[in-house]
Image (cartoon, grey):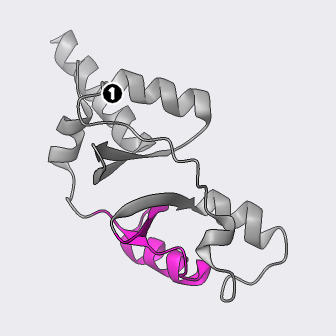
């Protein structure tokens, strides 16, 4: 059974973040530059939210708001679902499926240590299935 920490070991260690006072536009520029679909929102070192492309589409674009003037805190999801490094990939898949989310920040206690995506989880599951079949 694969664990979240194994996914993190294979990933780039950087977790991209914005502050709640950043504009949605600044967050989108970062997501485009880093080719990612979500960023964590940090106040200092404290995780206070997550912002995804879906949040932008539903809460800015469709509501006619300005991404240049709207602060992240207005549209971020502040009820962040997190996992720990010792959780299984299968648990993550179940969480992501049941909650309809695509990104999970990884916390070791109060410290943010990474972020995994649905793609990371699927890749890990498929990789394990290949190993099991051999």
- The residue labelled by disc 1 is 89
In the depicted view, which residue is nearer to us: 15 or 53? Answer: 15
Report crowding for label 1: few under 14, some 14 to 19, many 20 or more residues within 10 A (C-alpha): many
Looking at the image, residue 12 lies above or below residue 35: above
Bounds of the magenta segment? 15-44
Q: What residue do we see at 52% from left, 58% from top?
A: 50
Image location (x, y in percent) of residue 4? 26, 35
Q: Is residue 113 left or right of residue 67?
A: left
Q: Is residue 104 left or right of residue 89?
A: right
Is 64 included in the stretch rendered in magenta?
no
Image location (x, y in percent) of residue 109? 27, 43
Q: Is residue 77 left or right of residue 126?
A: right
Q: Quadrant of the N terminus?
A: top left
Q: Return the residue found at the far top.
A: 133
Image location (x, y in percent) of residue 48? 49, 60
Is 21 included in the stretch rendered in magenta?
yes
Looking at the image, residue 97 lies above or below residue 1: below
Give the total of numbered labels: 1
Q: What residue do we see at 33% from left, 45% from top?
A: 106
Looking at the image, residue 109 lies above or below residue 71: above
Q: What residue do we see at 24% from left, 22% from top?
A: 128
In the depicted view, which residue is nearer to us: 46 or 115? Answer: 46
In the depicted view, which residue is nearer to us: 130 or 11? Answer: 11
């Amino acid at each position: 059974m694969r664990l979240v920490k194994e996914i993190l070991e294979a990933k780039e260690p950087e977790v991209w973040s914005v502050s709640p006072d950043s504009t949605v536009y600044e967050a989108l520029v970062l997501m485009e530059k880093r080719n990612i679909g979500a960023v964590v929102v940090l106040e200092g070192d404290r995780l206070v939210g997550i912002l995804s492309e879906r949040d932008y589409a539903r809460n800015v674009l469709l509501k006619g708001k300005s991404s240049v003037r709207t602060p992240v805190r207005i549209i971020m999801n502040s009820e962040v679902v997190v996992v720990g490094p010792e959780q299984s990939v299968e648990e993550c898949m179940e969480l992501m499926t049941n909650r309809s989310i695509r990104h999970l920040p990884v916390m070791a206690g109060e410290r943010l240590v990474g972020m995994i995506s649905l793609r990371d989880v699927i890749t890990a599951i498929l990789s394990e299935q290949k190993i099991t079949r051999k």
